[in-house]
Image: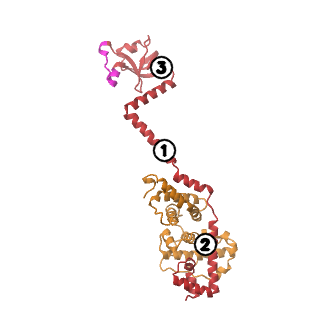
Chain colours: A orange, B red
Amino acid sequence: MGGEGTGTPMPGRKKLFDQIALPHLVSLYRTARQLAGPDKAEDLVQETLLCAWKHFNSFDPATNCRAWLFRILRNVWVSHWRKSRLELPLFEEGDIQFEPYYDWEDEILWNEIPERIETALRQLPVEYRWAILLADVEGFSYQEISRTMDCPIGTVMSRLNRGRRMLGRLLKAQCQSGEPDSPQGVFSEKTRGKS
Amino acid sequence: MMDCKQIREVLDLYIDHELSTEAMFSADVHLSECIACRRALLNLERMRHAVRTVVSSHEPPPTLERKVRYKLFSRWRPGSMLGIAASFLLLVFISAMFVHQARTYWADQLESWACRIDKPHEVMLEGKIECRDCKLHERYDVPAMCSTKGHHGALETPDGKIWNFLESKSSEALIHDATLLGKRIRVRGRLFRESGDVQVDSYQIL
């Protein structure tokens, strides 16, 4: 790997990094904010870009820089930032079961939910949150999400499917009760983890 | 052709454009004919749009990019400055130790500085009476004439420096009495750093 260990990258590389990597700082920040919170998002982004700069000599400019940066973000987050493993494990073993849509979504008043979205996102299991952020906010393909999260495409599909269903239930519960609901209240039997 | 149950199961793949071409076509046909499934698709799109809007509304602080650029690209990062300073000091140390001219230069500089900051003043010194000429011979191989002219007493302080006694009644024994050689004494007098002399007012053999 190149970077600081083999001496300062040439000025051309610095300009290239400035042109193709730093413009993604905003994307990295908004994802980091959903994962580490507003207080720690800056640190996570700085650490990510520092790691990217150190390994920039090994990056092929012809490939997708944004996807590469998000892989680094994921790795940095996994290494240093993931919270304790007390979170219930996701029920992802065995056959992948998809939850079909039902008509209860009609009950959500869509023009009232934006302020409840962040509360609901925080209540999602973090791997579902990752999948939704990468797909719905950043627009990555399943293949790219699979590489970023280092999991099979089937797992990506499952996490997106269940994550969106769970998000919908959380939002529905908030709309009905008028306040953020507890995760346990909207977990179905299919998504409750095994202890 | 897909039915409602199948559409509802693949709605995520449909909205993410991850279905095969044939499956997308089949789904499009069903959605064009089924109001309920179209409504489900619309709700899913609305939820995705809401998530995107809310998450994207948070801009990074204006200082973040500047901080990142400084950490990545600053030529004068604290770490590199420390390294440069340490390398410089090491170079000076090595040159001082192993290059004769450099050693002489730095010794002269330090001596000059010491003389400037330490004007002649009253002192009390402790040390050992040693023969000045024998010490010069021992350290610098300068020929000593002690066998013909006798020993010449001087004060060696703990730092290894040899101070000459200015000739006076008080210092006569210290300079010429060979029986005092090797004895530890305490001297009260005045120190002349520039000439390396000490004027003895009184002394005490320890």
Q: CA distance from mark 1 to mark 2?
A: 51 Å
Q: Residues within 10 Å of mark 3 (few under 14, many from 20)?
A: many
Instruction: Give the residue type that dot 1 points to.
Output: Leu
Image coords of residue B124 (percent x, y): 48, 21
| Chain for disc number 3 | B
**Residue at the spot x=47%, y=72% of the render?**
A151
Whether label 2 touches label 3, CB < 8 Å: no
Q: What residue is pinned by disc 1?
A: B82
Left or right of A100, for residue A1: left
Same chain for marks 2 and 3? no
Prevailing secondary structure of the magenta residues: helix
As displayed, is residue B199 above or below residue B70?
above
Residue A194 appears in view = no
As displayed, is residue A81 above or below residue B91?
below
| Chain for disc number 1 | B
Q: What residue is pinned by disc 2?
A: A183
Instruction: Give the residue type that dot 3 points to.
Output: Leu
Which of the image's four quarters has the N terminus of chain B? bottom right
Where are the magenta residues, as a range? Answer: B134-148
Image coords of residue A40 (percent x, y): 58, 59
Instruction: Give the residue type that dot 2 points to.
Output: Pro
**What is the secondary structure assignment of the residue under circle 3?**
strand
